[in-house]
Amino acid sequence: MDNTMVCLSAVLSSLAFLPALGLLKGISPALSPELLKVLAEMGHGDEIVFSDAHFPAHTMNARVIRADGLGCAELLKGLAPLFELDSYATPVVMMAPVPGDSLDPEVEKRYRAALGYTGKIEQMERYAFYERAKKAYAVVLTGETAKYGNVILKKGVTPVK
């Protein structure tokens, strides 16, 4: 390949993280083709992390999808109609604050509203959350700036209609 083709290939590869342009009906433009592929690959019980912008995603997991500029709630809202949460285990886990620190309760409220979820949300200690993220199917590194804005979702069985 000549230098022009190598450069063009590099540019196109670097654009892979950009959100889809909403070219499919019913699919949020916040969900990139790469994220849709990963969601489709996941099986029952697999977990995916939607992390805040400060999360050490590349340290925690080999499969990282970048969603720069997008908040977790926006991504969760786009994901909700497409992703069945596990009904056999607590399907939503958030990072608990470090002792002496506090959470903004609005973060959980935003995530609940985006998912349309009223069930239990497990709060997990920071380092336990990191260990769980290492075992997740993927980490979506978002532009979320809320402190403790990390959430893990466990995939359920998609109902047959």
Image: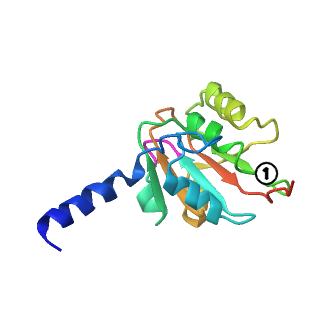
Q: Is residue 17 left or right of residue 90?
A: left
| Magenta region | 51-55
* Residue 96 in view (yes/no): no
Residue 24 seen in the current view: yes
34 and 124: which is toward the camera: 34
The residue under the point 87% across, 53% down is: 161
Where 78 falls versus 55 (above or below)? above
The x and y percentages for residue 90 are 79, 51
Q: Where does residue 101 sit, x and y in percent of width and height?
A: 55, 33
Which corner quadrant holds the N terminus? bottom left
Q: In this view, does 158 lie to the left or right of 148?
A: right
Toward which corner of the image does residue 133 lie, by quadrant? bottom right
The residue lying toward the viewer, choosing from 143 and 18, is 18
Residue that lies at the very extreme toward the bottom in this rendered image? 1
Q: Where is residue 117 in the image (x, y as percent from the top left)?
A: 77, 37
Count neighbours of disc 1 (C-alpha within 10 A) and say few if under 14, some if 14 to 19, many if 20 or more.
Answer: some
Q: What residue type is labelled 1?
A: Thr
Marks counted in the figure total 1
Q: In this view, does 92 lie above or below 89?
A: above
How far from the left and from the top, in percent, is residue 64? 46, 58
Residue under pointer 1: 90
Q: What coloring was used for the rendering?
A: rainbow
Say if 5 sits above or below 34 in the image. below
